[in-house]
Image: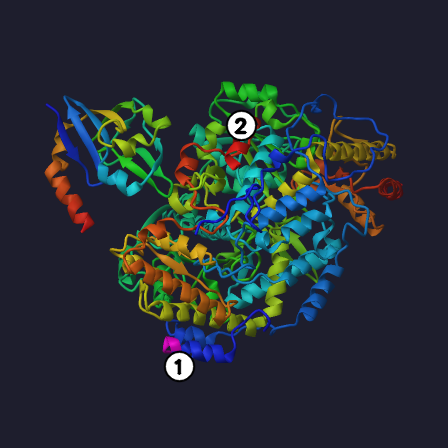
Amino acid sequence: MRYLPLTQDNRTEMLAAIGAKNVDELFCDLPKSALASAKFNLPNTQSEMSVERDLGKMAAKNLNCGQAPSFLGAGNYRHHTPASLDYIIQRGEFLTAYTPYQPEISQGTLQAIYEFQTQVALMTGMEVANASMYDGATACSEAVAMACRVTKRTRALISGKVHPHYADVTSTSMKFLNVDVDCLAPDPFNVEDLIGRVDSSLACVVVQTPSFFGHLSNFTALAEACRSAGVLLVVCVSDPVSLGALIPPGRMGADIVVADGQSLAGPMGFGGPGVGLFATREKYVRQMPGRLAGETTDEDGRRGWVLTLSTREQHIRREKATSNICTNSGLIALAFSVHMTLLGEAGFKRLAKLNHAMAAVLARKLASVKDVRVLPSNYFNEFVVELPKDAAEVAEQLAARGILGGIPVSRFYPTYPELTDLLLVTATETNTMEDIDAFTGALKEVLS
Amino acid sequence: MSQLRFSKDHEWIAVDGDVGTVGITQYAQNQLGDIVFVEVPEAGKDVKAGGEAAVVESVKAASEVYAPVSGTVTEGNAVLADKPETVNEDPQGAGWFFKIKVADAAELDGLMDQAAYDKYVAELDA
Amino acid sequence: MTKPTTASGHAGLQLEQALIFEQDTPGATAVDLPDLPDHIDTMGEFENKDAIGLPGLSEPEVVRHYTRLSQKNYSIDSGFYPLGSCTMKHNPRLNEKMARLPGLADIHPFQPVSTVQGALELIDTCAHWLTELTGMAAVAMSPAAGAHGELCGLMCIKSAHDAAGSSRSIVLVPDSAHGTNPATAALCGYTVESIPANAEGRVDLGALKSRLGPDIAAVMITNPNTCGLFERECIEIADAVHEAGAYFYMDGANFNAIVGRLRLSDLGVDAMHINLHKTFSTPHGGGGPGAGPTVISKALAPFAPVPFVVRKGDGYEVEEHAGFGAAKQSYGRMKGFHGQFGVFVRALSYMMSMGVDGLKQASGDAVLNANYLLARLSAELTPAYPGPCMHEAVFDDRFLKGTGVTTLDIAKALIDEGFHPPTMYFPLVVHGALLMEPTETESKAALDQFIESMLHLARKAKAGDAAEAFKAAPQLAPRRRLDETKAARKPILRWKPSEDAAARQAAE
């Protein structure tokens, strides 16, 4: 078997050095009954060629977004990544390295994390960021847990414009901590009043911009209301490409910013793995979960980096840790950072503008279809449209015509029948004018 | 007349009248190594004997500092926020953690005096 | 003999590299983008007109930057990486190739389900391998890492207790447990109590039995445990736990020792997380991503989190909402989208390549390799427990007594020898621990090289006059020992523009 280097001769020699007759002797502590009854109905070893064939068949059963014009978002986005990026993250020294616990031989990972932390802080307009969380949804949950620690309160309010997965993951974990999470009803028409709901029993208010439905918001007034009541403001960002064009949450007065970095890090991958971005104020750094790389010097006075403030973490603090997180999303964080380095300030801003432009063109064309209404007046690259009929049916019919045209909002909210005509539509720089015309044309057909 | 007492968790308390000054011992700071962060309690906090009062962290460890006696905190050592290394340099002097108004002086009898503490530490190292 | 200094600060192929922020060329970019189409801007007052402060570089500069960074990293591809309980086995590139198939990479989680049947089939197939290998009734695929899987297991357990109307509040955890165990229990609202180990490094069954009672919700046992030993009384532990009305959670970090040899269901396990990035070869990537699917018993299965894949006729559907359909009693959602799909692809590619016979061979070779290290290194090092061990061996620091050399010093000296040090100072129950897990993908020659270096260092330490040399190690790595105290006292967690000049000076 190609991954197993030991030969029979090796094994014989090694057993002799150990003083055992055979390998089974080494398993003498395992219960005999369990060893005897172990039966596994699974196939035996396969060659590379055979595995490629089998997995290739599974892959071929999917309609991939390279095969059909696609306009899908809702927290997971199709962006182009430069060829250099994938090449860099496949270097064995990045791909097959462990957590940098021995800093002398992990400076590559540590410097990259430090650069990533800086880029995330700059993009979000915040003071400090960590080395990553699993994804945006769990980062949101961790932010609420952190707000409870900082304020010593046990109530949270989540806007109805926050990604439902972020809200669900947060509600689930907070339930086990007896933190009361008030999730407002989905708000595709942008009518909810948050400022009026701020009071000093809250640890935090959680909002999102661009919102799940595409609306843009300036939370400066809300941030002020929160500050007066000692409440933290947590802002979620769905597609961090938006940070290349919009006022960053840090400048609005956010206390914690979370996001999923998948859109910049690489392919959609059916939703995982992504990378959770987490940024906050320096004064809260000891309450922040996750790993942190910090600058220092070595014995020769040369600059280097180490993991630091580890006493927040599970391996030291155990049941009093800020989180139980250990493995996070290091390689995807690296991919995110590499892409941001390739883009640079100029490229990032241009990419964002291009995304918005494609969405603006798409919105105008869709709005020209009879009985189709674009709901947000301001948006970045994603917006919800109201159709004259069931959006899930429309999406299926579009797919039958080879167009992946938006996501029915009802997929996320099974108990809100009033949302069944809403379709969430996204455009990125990967869409072409031909794609947009194909979508518009197919939608006209389906609705007629 | 001030009394100096020690707990099994290596806290010291120097009592003058009804106010005690609390810190960690030379042995404790040596075990912890370089101290990087200290969290002292706020004035007004009520603590019970054996209850958590402060936190002290080195690079690789975090330890609770327990109140040797019950009472109300009157002051936390503000110097330690910026200079946690003071605890390493002078653990039983400038490196004090907090001052406490002692609720029940009788509790001091349950703690070790210098001789008893020295014996206790000697046995730990054996 | 001191190394020569150079004008550049480089040392042959060891190339220094500044931060990207120190290489900024304003306006530069490595990505060319098309022109903007005609459009009417609808971002309005929300548009940002200010600078963000990101650096710009050309493509050649970026590639060189990250190439040089990578050259400062040790990795499995570079050499032996015997970190205990991390299972640093070879990461096959076939896994990477499969994960990049457009049909698996370029698909969106919310496409109509009819257009992603292959993806759902893949998740289901990966799930099937895991339930078959463990004999368990079901598996929750969504946890994103081992710690997340532990949380999933405990959340299922708490939900089951809640459904039964019981309010048990305590979880028992051995004092040798990994820190994630008590951290996870606390996240479920449980109080943690310790179970002591016996003289043989295993759970003290008597002590456990006497503590079990109506207030105990669960025990969390790692098996093989963090000392590399199999809990021989595992079935007795399970029986006692069940009799007391509690659940048996197993931490599966060390599954590599027993995969393909026995089933967890035969040990009485109720839930166990599996680290795909350990046992199933998916890459560690410098800190993730991983995946922690959690196998669960029939009793716990109804509470499993969403989403999960279900069969429907000849096809597949996905249950996405707790409280509906097959997810009626689900405790909720732990993660966005459908879990770590890219990690499933890599793991399945490995499982299919290895086959069940290969996996059994792997656990055999993993255990053989660890016992070989134990046997040969015992010539100079002091094993914490008598053998045989499972897939990892732990030594304590008795062999260093009186030498002035510590476990840390040995680890740093190993770096100069060209090896990544084993796990040090864990488990906490072993004094000055050195925990070594070679894995099955190391050749005998690689093990022999490591053994020679370790024996050499042990002898050198014991000679009694080498403490200073050890304290100075490493001398040959890209950096010498780094000041962690300074990093923790005055944390510098990001680059800032005003510090640019000072930092450049420090780097020279």
Q: Which residues are magenta?
A: A17-21
User: Toward the viewer: C507 or C380?
Assistant: C507
Mark 2 or mark 1: whose residue is earlier in sequence: 1
Question: Magenta segment: does it hold C109?
Answer: no
Q: Chain of mark 2?
A: A
The residue singled out by tag 1 in the image is A21
Where is residue A238 shown, x and y percent of the image? 65, 36
- Amino acid type indicated by mark 2: Asp
Question: In this picture, is A160 found above or below C175?
Answer: above
Mark carried by residue A255: 2
From the viewer's perspective, tell me whether residue C82 is left or right of residue C123. Answer: left
Where is residue A420 shown, x and y percent of the image? 73, 39
- The reply to whether residue C215 is in sight is no
Q: Chain of mark 1?
A: A
Q: Main secondary structure of the magenta part?
A: loop
Q: Residue at x 49, y 27 (%)?
A: A202
